[in-house]
């Protein structure tokens, strides 16, 4: 099977990003990290979850490149990595532009049809 | 364009992706634009550089349809076929859809086009329902429909980040 343009347009990086973003806990972790780096214990605090459960989510986020570990050896703080999110935004923006483009073409067509309405031969 | 920013992309359920968009035209015209091949060819041509080369529609419940997009330069083709399940002129159209090179498992998807009047304007609600969450999620990773799912998720992230 030939690789379609769509498959070429997506990469393993984006797959990992979206898989990581698919979970509400992981999105909440990213939101917390957007406010500044935090340790696993600090991240676990607002959730009704154990630290190992949080660590599991962090592992998914780290594999997707969305989170990295800071230098402090004791706290091992995690921090947000913005680049994959930016890639995903760019990719999704192109999807949005795709549909906006089609619907803009439809706008133009509808305007033309409206103008020709009432005339005996519309086509 | 005043309606250009009214496009919304959401995931109403595990198996669905939904696009909504307002059009500055009466509902009957929008319905024509979604159902008449000569009109569809003028706007559903895909990405830049592509055309909707084949658009055959047997417009009746149970009738088959087929679309083939063709790249204007390299001649690449992408085909999609399906069956019409419901027709309520000029407000509702339900069709099955399956791409020739299926990039998600199962028997394809079901697309519903719903048109509602808003004064002199028409609101389009286009929903694509996959056979399973798995199918939608795989499509999310590889297909353009899936990009909508991703977008919704990203919106959720940004909403949380903005809090």
Image (cartoon, helix red, strand yellow):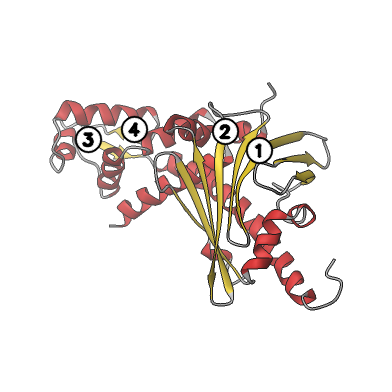
Which of discs 1 and 3 lies nearer the camera? The answer is: 1
Give the residue at mark 2: B108
Give the residue at mark 4: A61
**Protein chain holding label 2:** B
Horizontal and vertical percent for residue B158?
A: 37, 52
From mark 2 to mark 4, how far is it between C-alphas? 31 Å
Whether A25 is drawn above or below B162: the answer is: above
Horizontal and vertical percent for residue B101?
A: 66, 28
Mark 2 nearby-residue class (10 Å; few <14, some 14–19, many ≥20): many
Horizontal and vertical percent for residue B51?
A: 78, 46
Give the SS element for disc 4: helix
Q: Respond whether the residues carrying marks 1 and 3 are from the same subunit.
A: no
Q: Residue at x 61, y 57 (%)?
A: A100
- Check the picture and name the quadrant holding the N terminus of chain A: top right
> In the displayed structure, does residue A111 sit left or right of residue B92?
right
Whether A68 is drawn above or below B149: the answer is: above
Q: Are marks 2 and 1 in contact (CB under 8 Å)?
A: yes
Give the SS element for disc 3: loop
From mark 1 to mark 4, how far is it between C-alphas? 39 Å
From mark 2 to mark 1, how far is it between C-alphas? 9 Å
Relative depth, front residue between A123 and A39: A123
Which of discs 3 and 4 lies nearer the camera? The answer is: 4
> In the displayed structure, does residue B113 sit left or right of residue A119?
left
């Amino acid at each position: 099977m030939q690789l379609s343009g769509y498959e070429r347009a997506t990469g393993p990086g984006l797959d990992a990003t979206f898989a990581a973003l698919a979970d509400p806990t992981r999105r909440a972790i990213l939101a917390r990290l957007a406010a500044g780096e935090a340790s696993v214990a600090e991240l676990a605090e607002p959730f009704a979850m154990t630290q190992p459960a949080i660590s599991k989510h962090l592992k998914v986020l780290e594999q997707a490149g969305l989170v990295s570990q800071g230098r402090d050896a004791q706290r091992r703080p995690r921090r947000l990595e913005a680049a994959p999110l930016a890639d995903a935004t760019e990719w999704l923006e192109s999807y949005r532009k795709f549909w906006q483009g089609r619907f803009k073409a439809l706008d133009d067509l509808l305007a033309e049809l409206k103008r020709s309405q009432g005339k005996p031969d519309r086509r | 364009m005043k309606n250009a920013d009214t496009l919304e992309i959401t995931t109403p359920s595990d198996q669905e992706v939904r696009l909504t968009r307002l059009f500055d035209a009466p509902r009957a015209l929008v319905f024509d634009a979604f159902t008449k091949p000569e009109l569809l060819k003028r706007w559903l041509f895909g990405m830049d550089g592509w055309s909707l080369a084949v658009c055959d529609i047997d417009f009746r419940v149970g009738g088959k349809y087929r679309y083939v997009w063709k790249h204007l330069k390299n001649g690449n083709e992408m085909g999609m076929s399906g069956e019409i399940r419901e027709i309520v002129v000029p407000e509702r159209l339900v069709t099955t859809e399956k791409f020739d090179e299926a990039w998600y498992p199962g028997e394809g998807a079901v697309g519903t086009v719903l048109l509602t009047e808003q004064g002199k304007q028409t609101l389009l609600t286009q929903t694509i329902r996959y056979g399973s969450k798995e199918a939608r999620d795989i499509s999310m990773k590889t297909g353009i429909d899936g990009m909508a799912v991703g977008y919704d998720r990203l919106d959720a992230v940004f909403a949380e980040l903005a809090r």
